[in-house]
Image (cartoon, rainbow, N blue to C red):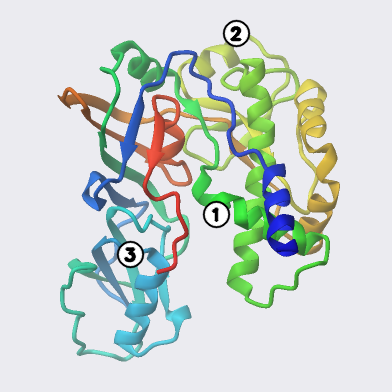
Amino acid sequence: MENSQQAESSSHRFNLDFPSASTSIRPRALMRKYNEDFKVTETLSFEPSGEGEHLFLLIEKNGCNTDWLSKQLARHFNVKPFSVGYAGKKDRYSQSQQWFSIHLPGVKAFDLPEANESFKILKTEKHNKKLRLGSIARNNFEIILRDVTQPFDQQVYEKIGSQGFPNYFAYQRFGFDGENLIAAEKMFNKTLKVKNRNLKGIYYSAARSYLFNLQLAERVRRQDWDQAIAGDCLMFDNSHAYFAAGEIDSDVIKRIEQGAIHPSGWLAGGQNSESRDLALKIEQTQLIDYSNWIDALTVVKMDSARRAYRVIPKQLSVSQQSDSIIKISFSLPSGAYATALLRELFEINDVARQPDER
């Protein structure tokens, strides 16, 4: 009883209801009543070469998560888990098309897994390198929302299509009811020892993502999350490259309005933030209570980085399928969350917000 009360108390510390940039009344909607309601198609940042020791598989999965499928592939091809690669994780509660790679040196003949209710192979290619995390140009989404309480407002969609939305890490990153953050804090306070290397990585990433969201949330409250302020580091669109802003002149303002550059926040790690002046003050104010987290991330040598505060979706379209059903499609760069976009438009009841055990 005492342990459950401690967990409950700890979970209440982490408020995952980050402020929305939208001022419009958001209709309620049900998401992922069926896996097919949430379709994702992955586009790699390169084309497989057609030759090499790595077998690339384009797989459509339904109702299973990426880690589970990776283990099934390792078992089928009789290789170690490390020999299987993928570019990014896709939700269990979805119908997703994503690429996997299997290292098969010297293997000339092999059998492919047979199609089943969980996944089927759509395409095979060869390549000379393992598929690495982040090797994604874009993820394309086609989402059906049900039980929508009112018709959509076209102007709201047009604004997001042109100006973007806050680039929050979504609730998937933090685990059911913030359990990944609870575990991370216990690790940092040395009240929990985690031996599993993969779990450690999940908890570290959740903690760093939460620190970023705190910074972005304050910029959203200030209504300058999509504008440059003194001391900002400005990130190039769809890139990890950025530069420290000097004077916020008309050229910077124009490039931001065009979507060519974006203000960015600090992903805590071994180096200090490169922000200055007002931008740095906002970061420091939001993170003042989390110095032990930042110290812990430094100790494990997690690299400091930046993440854009906003994302501008491509090919955003919406159609009313019936009085209570909406279909919305769009394309996002690697690392951006579809649910972060949808929360700007709807109060989402997501079937997937429950523990994922498979």
Front position in the image: 121 or 123: 121
Q: Mark 1 points at which residue?
A: 175
Horizontally, residue 127 falls left or right of residue 9, namely: left
**Residue under the image location 83 percent in, 66 percent down:** 190
Q: What residue type is labelled 3?
A: Cys
**Horizontal and vertical percent position of residue 46:** 34, 55
Q: CA–CA distance between discs 2 and 3?
A: 49 Å
The mark closer to the camera, 2 or 3, is: 3
| Discs 2, 3 touching: Cβ within 8 Å | no
Horizontally, residue 245 falls left or right of residue 120, namely: right
**Horizontal and vertical percent position of residue 136:** 39, 52
Horizontally, residue 325 falls left or right of residue 199, namely: left
Front position in the image: 294 or 324: 324
Q: Name the residue under label 3.
A: 64
Q: Which amino acid does label 1 sit on?
A: Gly
SS under mark 3: loop
Q: Which amino acid does label 2 sit on?
A: Ser
| Discs 2, 1 touching: Cβ within 8 Å | no
SS under mark 2: helix
Q: Callout 3: few (<14), some (14-19), or many (20+) C-alpha neighbours within 10 Å? A: many
Front position in the image: 93 or 86: 93
The disc at residue 67 is none
The mark closer to the camera, 2 or 1, is: 1
Q: Can you say whether 197 is above or below 232 in the image?
A: below
- Give the mark, 2 or 3, whose residue is nearer the N terminus: 3
The disc at residue 250 is 2
**Residue under the image location 36 percent in, 27 percent down:** 28
Pick the quarter of the image with the N terminus: bottom right
Q: Callout 1: few (<14), some (14-19), or many (20+) C-alpha neighbours within 10 Å? A: some
- Give the mark, 2 or 1, whose residue is nearer the N terminus: 1
